[in-house]
């Protein structure tokens, strides 16, 4: 007999993520924190009410996958290419060092703490992947804090925004490389050739879309414009996975980037947000919490969580701060930029989800990473207000 249990689970997920999301907003935190906590409560860590096993679990997993694709498509649509170009050099240097330092920090943290056997290829890749998760930056909470402080359009704010965008692109490239190398039967040279071919493919698609810009913009704000945009996102996501072995979220992100500078970009984003934030995204964030088994954390994992948290904070402050200093920013500005890049948020969750799916993160490592994401998201606005409180808007 067909089960309709998934309808009950969906209702509970939507209500709980909304209620706890509203509570998070009340205490000046992003709603994503509440959605994560809702998943943790509903999952094996607390109530053990919802499971991602069986037919119902498979449906929730597919819904969550659509949610993450929508999130990355929206992230691409939100990118301000003109702002990125105007502050390209300092943003690029800040982002580059801000990716390398956390990558090394995360790798060494895992390798030293768990005594990784460097002759074990898959174990080394797991250590690398922990570093990949730490490279991510979610700037949404930083943007809101900078807006409140009147610093969003200043020199520091612009650099943080530009670096966060480049950070995401670099992080996706690193994620693509590492996940592609996970299959030990595949020649690494083949992997890099496929990656190069993929970016050639993306370049060709971007060229075609740019030539069709007038036609797309002439369609204007019509429902079919959004439908075609979503279809384009899904096709690029499918092609990325099926033909190049690249994560589907990469295709979704580039689909958004190709449309972000068009006059219909904001319209598409507004329409995408309706199904995304009302249904698909809450299921995605809740699924992350449901996968997190905090009850299985022993004293060793708790210590590792603390170590990873300290590494996550310090590597962004040092890495991005160093990048800013190389671009002639003052010590104070470099510190502000570094602090502004601490928050991992939904971007790190998306990366962690991909690692979990391909076997590079197991249940043991998943919980510490989710804890790091939650804590860095919570402390970033607090630290940002502290380092900016005694300086006038730039």
Image: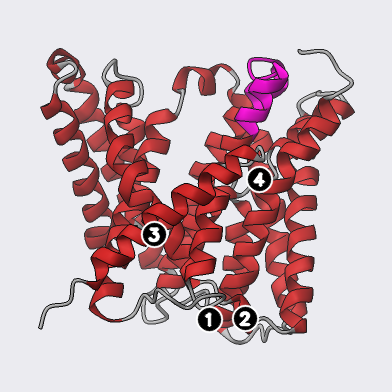
Query: Would residue 278 be seen by someone viewing this image from the given angle?
Result: yes
Q: Which residue is mark 3?
A: 13
Mark 4, residues whose alpha carbon is within 10 Å: few (<14), some, or many (≥20)?
A: many
Q: Is residue 346 visible?
A: no
Q: Are marks 3 and 1 in contact (CB under 8 Å)?
A: no
Determine the image quadrant of residue 192: bottom left
Disc number lying in front (3 or 2):
3
Determine contact: label 4, label 2, CB under 8 Å.
no
Question: What residue range appears in magenta?
Answer: 142-159
Q: Please tell me which of labels 4 and 1 falls first in the chain.
A: 1
* C-alpha distance separating marks 3 and 1: 35 Å
User: In the image, residue 270 lies at what x, y percent?
Assistant: 32, 27
Residue 101 among magenta residues: no
Task: Identify the residue at horizontal 59%, vertical 29% (top origin).
Answer: 161
What SS does tag 2 mark?
A: helix
Q: Which residue is mark 2?
A: 295
Apparent side of residue 77 relative to residue 349 in the rendered image (left or right): left
Q: Nearer the viewer, mark 4 or mark 3?
A: 3
- Pinpoint residue 324: horizontal percent, then vertical percent: 76, 31
In this picture, is 192 found above or below 78? below
For mark 1, what is the residue? 122
Q: CA distance from mark 2 to mark 1?
A: 26 Å
Q: CA distance from mark 4 to mark 3?
A: 25 Å
């Amino acid at each position: 007999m067909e089960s309709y249990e998934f309808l009950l689970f969906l209702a509970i997920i939507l209500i709980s993520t909304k209620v706890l999301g509203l509570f998070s907003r009340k205490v000046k935190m992003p709603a994503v924190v509440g959605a994560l906590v809702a998943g943790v409560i509903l999952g094996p860590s607390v109530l053990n009410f919802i499971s991602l096993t069986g037919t119902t679990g498979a449906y929730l997993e597919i819904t969550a996958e659509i949610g993450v694709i929508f999130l990355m498509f929206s992230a691409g649509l939100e990118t301000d290419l003109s702002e990125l170009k105007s502050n390209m050099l300092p943003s690029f240097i800040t982002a580059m060092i801000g990716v390398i330092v956390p990558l090394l920090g995360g790798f060494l943290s895992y390798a030293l703490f768990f005594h990784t056997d460097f002759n074990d290829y898959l174990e080394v890749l797991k250590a690398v992947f922990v570093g990949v998760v730490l490279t991510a930056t979610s700037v949404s909470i930083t943007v809101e804090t900078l807006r409140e402080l009147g610093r969003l359009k200043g020199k520091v704010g612009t650099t943080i925004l530009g670096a966060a965008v480049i950070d995401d692109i670099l992080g996706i490239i690193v994620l693509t490389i590492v996940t592609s190398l996970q299959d030990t039967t595949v020649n690494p040279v083949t992997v890099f050739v496929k990656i190069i071919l993929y970016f050639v493919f993306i370049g060709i698609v971007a060229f075609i879309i740019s030539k069709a810009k007038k036609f797309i913009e002439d369609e204007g704000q019509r429902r079919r414009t959004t439908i075609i945009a979503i279809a384009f996102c899904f096709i690029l996501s499918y092609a990325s996975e099926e033909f190049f072995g690249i994560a589907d979220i990469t295709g979704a992100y580039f689909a958004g980037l190709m449309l972000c500078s068009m006059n219909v970009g904001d319209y598409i984003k507004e329409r995408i947000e309706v199904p995304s934030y009302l249904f698909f995204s809450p299921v995605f964030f809740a699924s992350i919490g449901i996968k997190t088994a905090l009850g299985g954390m022993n004293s060793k994992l708790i210590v590792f969580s603390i170590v990873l948290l300290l590494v996550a904070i310090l590597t962004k402050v040092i890495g991005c701060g160093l990048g800013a200093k190389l671009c002639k920013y003052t010590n104070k500005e470099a510190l502000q930029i570094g602090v502004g890049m601490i928050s991992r948020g939904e971007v790190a969750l998306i990366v962690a989800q991909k690692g979990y799916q391909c076997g590079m993160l197991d249940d043991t490592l998943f919980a510490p990473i989710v804890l790091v994401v939650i804590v860095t998201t919570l402390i970033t606005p607090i630290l940002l207000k502290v380092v900016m409180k005694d300086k006038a808007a730039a």
